[in-house]
Amino acid sequence: MKRNLKTLATETFDLVVVGGGVTGLAIARDAAMRGLAVALVEKDDFGAGNSSNSLKIVHGGLRYLQHLDFRRMRQSIRERRILLATAPHLVKPLGFLLPTHGHGLRGRLAMGVALAMNDLVAWDRDATTDPERRLPGGRILSLSRCRELVPMGLPTDCTGGALWYDAQMLDSERLLVSMAESASEAGAALANHAPVCGLLRRHGKIAGVTVEDGETGERFPLRGLLTVNAAGACLDSILQLDPGIRVAPQPLSVAMNLVLKRPLLREVGLAVSTAISVPDPEARIRRAERMLFITPWRQGSLIGTFHLPFHEPAEEFCLSRHHLNSFLQEVRTAMPWAALSEDDIGLIHAGLLPSLATTGHESPGARV
Ligand SMILES: Cc1cc2nc3c(=O)[nH]c(=O)nc-3n(C[C@H](O)[C@H](O)[C@H](O)COP(=O)(O)OP(=O)(O)OC[C@H]3O[C@@H](n4cnc5c(N)ncnc54)[C@H](O)[C@@H]3O)c2cc1C
């Protein structure tokens, strides 16, 4: 993979992609493999935005069941299957346990039906003959089995648990670099440290971007028949480069994970309900509260994802003590048995995500 800005400045590409996170790189890779001439520019390093901040879960779309959005479930199942098959060294199956309680929608019966529906929609979830990469079907577990799987503790009203399988990225940064290499091998021209600082127009239409070489400060035009804005939270900053583009600003939310030095569990991930209700106008079955996921991660654990609306321009984001305290408070309320202290925290992942419109109070709009 070679950073060749001269090629970028002289050719006209079929596709110009702005942003070298997972979205931009996946688009560039896919388009290049289909034979298009593709250029991608990233202002920092590849994955410098959210793509290196992830909770590392490759979701198969179980949550879209409550929206009865089977199309989105199928898309998520397909992408999970492709990642498990094409990057078996970087993506592995991981079971997730959701404690059941009562006799309502979180009861054993209702969750059993949900798991059966999930398995039905995901009937072709395995694309691999490697038994270690297969995703077993979901099932309801007894309370004693749940206690074995999650020795750190469970909610007091827990009656057992719903177990389903998703996948976990073992190294999201390495996965991203593999995607960049694979895009480059397919012919895409990629450059990091090359921020977009203007939009080009031809016959009134967007015809590429102006790029600055982050090393020399030199600016040059990068021409493309189609330009894709994959700048994540900086989506609006790109659009604002052209005074002729007027769109409503994209609401943003702060998203955070904690990397804990302590292994809270080893065999499965745990999903825990919080007291925070999430405005979810698309939900058909239940207006859900926010879930926190705790996953085994190397020698410790990962916990997330926390959200808080962010009302400033993306460039001004800076993680504050208020963010950390709010997150710790949420974790301690949702899972007091984990006795989380600040000393447990080894690292904080934080980023901004484009989110759903919020109601103005401190309720989260984005989900990961
Ligand atoms: C704490 C946290 C936990 C998460 N957990 C999960 C999870 O478990 N599972 C999951 O599926 N998703 C998760 N997500 C969401 C996931 O990380 C994002 O959906 C994904 O990374 C978005 O990728 P992206 O490429 O769209 O954006 P980004 O990765 O943010 O990439 C956008 C890129 O555009 C670049 N850019 C910006 N401005 C310019 C410019 N002017 N010129 C050139 N480049 C520019 C940025 O530098 C950046 O690299 C999580 C997110 C966060 C923050």
Image: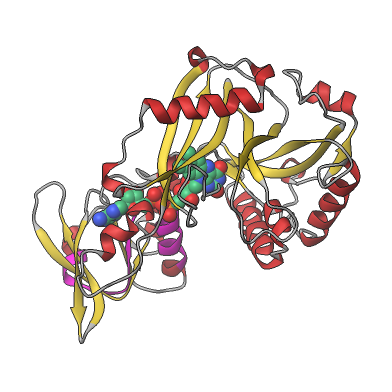
Residue sitting nearer the eye, 201 or 65: 65
Q: Is residue 12 magenta?
A: yes
Number of marks in the rendered image: 0
Say which of 314 and 120 sits in front.
314
Question: What colour scheme was applied to this rendering of the protein?
Answer: secondary structure
**171 or 198: nearer the eye?**
198
* Left or right of 134 on screen, residue 311: left
Lateral position of residue 74 relative to residue 316, left or right: right
Q: Is residue 253 shown in magenta?
A: no
In percent of width and height, residue 179 lies at: 45, 52
Q: Is residue 198 above or below residue 326?
A: below
Whether residue 292 sits left or right of residue 148 in the image: it is left
Give the x, y percent position of residue 221: 16, 68
Residue 9 at x, y percent in the picture: 16, 67
Residue at (69% x, 17% y) in the render: 337
Q: Which residues are magenta?
A: 8-30
Q: Quadrant of the rendered structure where residue 149 is?
A: top right
